Amino acid sequence: MSWYMNKSMGRIAGACGLALALSGCAHDANRSPKELLSLSVSGLSGVDRYAFSGDTAIGAASGTASRPAAFRGTVQHHDQVSVQTEGGADEMPAGVHPLRLLNDVERMAARAEVVPEASNGQRTVLRITADPAKAAKVWTNRLRSEFALLKNKVPANGSAASARDAGTRSQEKPSALREAWDRELDRSGKEFEAMLSTMSVRSTSTLVIDRKKLLPLSLEERTEFRYEANGKPARESRTTRIAFKRS
């Protein structure tokens, strides 16, 4: 009898161990996926220094994607970001600040679930589906920030060299260039706002969390936009991948 009970208990223990491993590990068993998401975000906000790297790619409706724009950097004193893009410019791609990106993923989340087949004793993998309305709001703000950066990049007197060669018109060209730039910005801005007013957003993220430290290891955000451009339906996608490393 005792032998049978011991054997049965061993089988039960083994089955429980397998179930816990598949669900994302024992110490995660009492935490919901959304709690794990929240803990990983708050955990990263408490880290004084860490490094990150990743890339962002934009896809067109035709299915073709742009060459990913790579970036890497460090965060010190919780929020002092130092970053370099692949081209060497010290400018963070809009919407890719590591902690802000994670905060946005948490803010948009409608559902979070553990991915059992990708989780193991060292990591828990979460699949996070964004609420479409919240995602549209977050992305509207991101895209407006990108457009604002473009507006601030007024062409300097880059044409001044050619203007100097034009003799008496050297003082007119920069002014004419600025006027043309402002007209184009005004036209583009109206088209941009019309696009945003029709935009719908679907976004999903995959977050890999260190099982023991409850800190993010990597994040991949995939987003699809549908909108109208010049009265015609259009579609675009954007994928951002980022990896975290304690430095």
Image (cartoon, grey):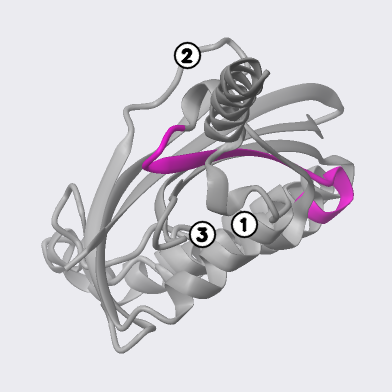
Which callout, 2 or 1, points at the residue further toward the start of the chain?
A: 1
Distance from Cα at disc 2 to Cα at disc 1: 35 Å
Assign a secondary structure to mark 2. Answer: loop
Foreground tag (2 vs 1):
1
Tell whether label 2 touches label 3 (CB within 8 Å).
no
Q: Can I make out residue 179 in this image?
A: no
Which callout, 3 or 1, points at the residue further toward the start of the chain?
A: 1
Residue 103 in the image: above or below residue 17:
below
Magenta segment boundaries in residue numbering? 120-135
Which residue is pictured at 41% across the width and 73% down the height? 175
Q: Position of residue 72 (x, y in %)?
A: 22, 56
Foreground tag (3 vs 1):
1
**Closer to us: 110 or 43:** 43
Which callout, 3 or 2, points at the residue further toward the start of the chain?
A: 2
**Residue corresponding to mark 2:** 64
Circle 2 residues within 10 Å: few <14, some 14–19, many ≥20: few
Q: Can I make out residue 14 in this image?
A: yes
Quadrant of the image occupied by residue 70? top left
**Residue corresponding to mark 3:** 95
